[in-house]
Image (cartoon, helix red, strand yellow):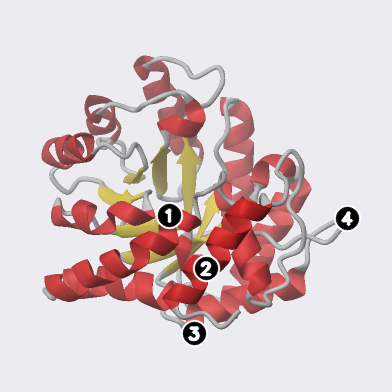
Amino acid sequence: MSIFTGSCTAMVTPFTEDGINFESLGNLIEFQIKEGTDALLACGTTGEPSTMTQEERNQVIRYTVEKVAKRVPVLAGTGGNNTKAVIKASKDAQDLGADGLLIVTPYYNKTTQKGLVAHYKAIAEAVDLPIIIYNVPSRTGLNMTPATLYELSKVKNIVGMKEASGDIVQVAEMARLCRGSVDIYSGNDDMVVPVLSLGGKGVISVAANIVPRDVHDMVESFLSGDIEKSRDLQFKLNPLIQALFLEVNPIPVKTALNLLGFQMGPLRMPLTDMSEQNLNILKQRMREYGFDL
């Protein structure tokens, strides 16, 4: 039930003052597909789902599925810290035609490793879609251990892990224990090549919103055996990636898309515009990368 190999863009959601800008979303989707992105994620963290209504999230998933029209797989972010609500959102995404689900570990109430197993098993039993677990302790306050991932890898439709702990030793242990029974994706744009070297299948990327071709090529070249090209692309990307995380995601990447004319609209509070100092750094890094601003 593997969903994709390569680069999946965690797409920004373009907002108007009172809703979703579907024309701009469509333009972003077409740009991504044209530039070689291997899969698209709607309503991941980068898409600001925590400040969207469930109706808005479903509208974005529906539109993305219809616009993509099976050209690449579409993942839907349906995670949360209320298991019943996640099941409902996941069933909605399945009904809307998503190809797979990205489900973050519960935040705030956090739970135990035993609770994580129960949470994901309950969701997996309620849907038929393949599920990628998303481990991002910096946001959730909770880390899924390699042993817990190994336990969940025995569930038929739990097929992947987006690993964003930043701990390469943990990634290695996950790969060792699971031995290919789950696909491992880098959740950190600056660690793609190291994760691929441990058997990873790709990345779920923030930077790919603005540089989809290079992120795709970084993964493809590694998997096709051109390690030097892949490493060089990682080195080229990293200064830009650092600028895209000067402030909490998705503030810088949404700002970057707006600078490039994609008309992504405003951020939703509590997220706010970049500070002038960080904005100047972002612009400088984009120019150094080759963007004409």
**Residue that appears at 76% across and 63% down:** 265
Q: Which residue in the protein does label 3 denote?
A: 34
Q: Which residue in the protein does label 4 denote?
A: 18
Percent position (x, y) of residue 244?
A: 50, 56
Q: Residue 253 versus residue 209: which sits nearer the camera? A: 253
Measure the alpha-carbon separation of dots 2 and 1: 12 Å
**Count of numbered badges drawn on the protein:** 4
Percent position (x, y) of residue 80?
A: 58, 33
Mark 3 or 1: the one toward you: 1
Q: Which residue in the protein does label 1 denote?
A: 242
Residue lying furthest right: 18
Mark 4 or 2: the one toward you: 2
**Residue that appears at 69% across and 59% down:** 60
Q: Where is the N terminus found, in terms of image quarters?
A: bottom left
Mark 3 closeness class: few <14, some 14–19, many ≥20 residues within 10 Å = few
Measure the alpha-carbon separation of dots 2 and 3: 26 Å
Looking at the image, residue 217 sits to the left or right of residue 179; the answer is right
Disc 1 residue type? Gln
Mark 1 closeness class: few <14, some 14–19, many ≥20 residues within 10 Å = some
For marks 2 and 3 on the same chain, the one whose residue lies earlier in the sequence: 3
Disc 4 residue type? Asp
Q: Residue 155 versus residue 113: which sits nearer the camera? A: 113
Is residue 234 visible in the rendered image? The answer is yes
For marks 3 and 4 on the same chain, the one whose residue lies earlier in the sequence: 4
